[in-house]
Image (cartoon, rainbow, N blue to C red):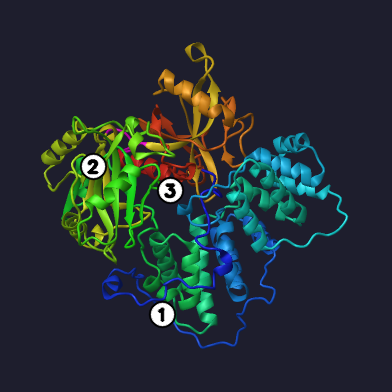
Amino acid sequence: MHRLGRFAMQKSIESFFGQKRALATKASPAAKKQRIEAPEQVEVKAEPKPVDSKPDASGTLEYGDLTNVFDKIEATTKRLEITKYCSDFFSRVLETHPHLLPQITYLCINRLGPDYEGLELGIGESIIIKALAESTGRTPAQIKKDYNQLGDLGGVAIASKKSQATMFKPKPLTVDIVFKRLVEIAKSSGQQSQSKKVNIIKQLLVSCRGVEAKYLVRSLEGKLRIGLAEKSVLVALSQAFVQHDLRLGRETLAPEAAEDLVKDVFCQMPNYETIIEAAINGGVKHLPEVVKLTPGVPLKPMLAKPTKSITEVLDRFSGEKFTCEYKYDGERAQVHCTASGSMHVYSRNMEDMSQRYPDIIDIIPKIRTPKTVDFILDCEAVAWDTAQHKILPFQVLSTRKRKDVESGDIKVKVHLFVFDILYLNGEPLLTKALSERRQLIADNFNLLADQFSPAVSMTSESIEEIQHFLDQSVKDSCEGLMIKMYEGQESGYEPSKRSRNWLKLKKDYLDGVGDSLDLVVLGAYFGRGKRTNVYGGFLLGAYNPDTEEYETVCKIGTGFSEADLERFHQLLSPLADPKPKSYIDHDPAANQQPDVWFEPKHVWEVLTADLSLSPVYRAGHHELGKGVSLRFPRFIREREDKGPEDSTTSDQLVQFYQRQVSIAD
C-alpha cells in the first residue's frame, strides 16, 4: 500500500494545544503496575535556564527548513549523522514551533497520521506528471522522457522548475500548508477528485523553491528515499525530548534510557501526536504514566522466530516452562472493545478490518461475560466448515470480499481462535505471564460453538509428545505449532517484536530454512510455450527499511497453476514498466533482466530449499558483500494481508543465511 495513503491525523493539528485529551489523568494503581518500565532509568537533573521556548510569533515554519534537512540526510549514509540531523531539527522545532512537530514527524516518514486511520492518498504517477507539466509549462511527454532518463521524478521536478519562467516570486511554502494540502488530497473523493488533486499539486509546485520540489514529489510518490528509517526517527525524537527537558530544567533520562522508553511507548500507542503532546507537557520520563495501551488503538502484534526442529525448541526453552499451540492458517485479527461499546477488528499491520468481518463484530457482545468491560484480544480468523466443524484452507478464506461486506451475504464463515489477551477492564496485561493471561481469557469470555474458542494447546517437554501434537495440528488443517514461554518475566507480550520467546515450528519447513518467506514482486519475464500470453517467471525482492529500497532476491517460476498465471498477468499488467523504479536495488549488468518491471505492491509467500550467496542478487549485499538468494523457490500463495513494507526484510534474509551456515558448520 502507498505509504502516504492509510493515514489521517487523529484530530486536527489546529487543536493540538487546544482541548486536551485525558492524558494527564492520574493512573489507577492497577494500571501503574502494568506501565512500561525503562531499563535502568538514569535521571538527569538540570538547573533551569532562561530560554525562550515560546512558538515563533508567526506560528509558521518554512517547508524549505525541513527539505534542507532531508538534503543533508540524503548526502550521508552514516546512521549516527542521520539521527543527529533529525534530532537537532526536532529539538529546534520543540523550542520554537512545538505544535508543528507531529506534522514534521509524519512528513519524515511519509505518512499523514497513525497507520490505523486508513486514509489513502490515491495519487498515481500520471497525476504527478500531469501536475508537474502544467505547473512548469512543459508537456507530459517531455516530463516522461526526462523521467525515463533520470529515474527520479523528484529530480525531474527540480530540473523542470529551473527552466520555468515566473512573473513574480511566490510566497514561501510552510510545513503547515504542505501538510494540510496533502491531507486535502487524501480526503478528495467524487467525480472531480482527480482534477482537484492535480490543481492542489500544481499550486504547491509553483510555490516550491530550491530542493522543495524534489521532496514534495517524492512525498507524493510515497518514498522519500533518503535513508531515513522510522526507527531513526524514534531515536531522534527521544533525543529531542531529553534536550527539551533539559532546556526547561526538568528531570529527564539518560539518552539510551529515553530511547528505549520512547520505543516501548510507541509499540503500545503508535500515535506520534499523542506521544509528542505528552512529552511536551510532562517530559519523557513520565510518558509511561500517561501514554498507555488503549482499546480502540491497535498495536503491531508480537511475532515468532522460526525454528527447524523440536530439539532446537527444547534447547531454547531448557529449564523453562513452555507451551505449544496450534498455528492456525488464517488471518491475524486483533479484536478491540471499548468501555463505551465501540468494537473493531484490526489486521497485523493495523488496518481496520471491521467492515470486512462484520460477522466477527456480531459475536463480540456474545463472547463478553457480565464482568467484561473493555478488552483487546489477539486471535486468528480462519475459514470454517460449520457442517463438518472443521478448518478450511486459507485459500477459501481469501475468497471473501474485502469491502462492503454484509453479514447476511457471507458464504465463507469464520471461526475466531483466541490465543492471547493484551488488555482487560482498564488494565494493560503485557507484562503478566502467559499462564495468567490464558486464565483471564477462560474466566472472562464465553465460548461459542463454530465461532469462538481458545487455540488448541498442550504443555509437554517430551519430544515424542510434541511430535505427535505437531502431526495432529497438520491433520487438523493447521500450519504447525507455536511454542511460547509460559511463565516468568520472558513470557510477557512484546508488541511489534519478533521474539525468541515465541518460536514457530512448521511441518513443511523442517528440512529447509525453517519458515516460508514473504517477498515482493518486482518484475516479470514473458512466458514461452504453454505460458505464452502470460508471464512465465517473476523477479522477487526483499524490503530494506534502512535504505527504503527493494533489493532483488531471486527469479521464480514454479508453484503456479495455470489459473494463478492468468490471474497474476491480469493483476500485474497495469503496473508494468519497461524500467525499474529508482528505489529497486538491482544489478543492471546481470543477465536475464526482467522483460517488465512493476511498482512494488504485491507480496507472495515463497518456500525454498535453502539460501545461497549470489553475485547477481542484491538482498543483504551491504553486509555480506554478495546478495542472499533462494535455491529452488516455489510459490505458495499471495499475501493480501501484507503490504510491501511488511515483507521479509533484507536483514531477516541475512539472519536466515547466517543461521543456516552456522548449523552446517
**Neighbour class for label 1 at 10 Å: few (<14), some, many (≥20)?**
some
Q: Which residues are magenta?
A: 511-516
The first of marks 2 and 1 along the sequence is 1
Taking the spot 18% from the left edge, 60% from the top edge, the residue there is: 436
**Neighbour class for label 2 at 10 Å: few (<14), some, many (≥20)?**
many
Q: Which residue is mark 3?
A: 351
Q: Residue 265 at what x, y percent from top left?
A: 40, 65
Q: Is residue 172 magenta?
A: no
Of residues 443 and 34, the one nearer the viewer is: 443
Q: Which residue is mark 1?
A: 43
- Looking at the rendered structure, the number of numbered marks drawn on it comes to 3
Residue type at mark 2 is Gln
**Neighbour class for label 3 at 10 Å: few (<14), some, many (≥20)?**
some
Task: Please state if 113 lies on the left or on the right of 402 as rendered.
Answer: right
Taking the spot 52% from the left edge, 25% from the top edge, the residue there is: 570
Q: Which residue is mark 2?
A: 451
Q: Is residue 50 above or below residue 257?
A: below
Q: Quadrant of the C terminus?
A: top left
**Could you give the CA–CA distance between mark 2 and mark 1, rounded to whole angstroms?**
50 Å
Circles 3 and 2: CB atoms closer than 8 Å:
no
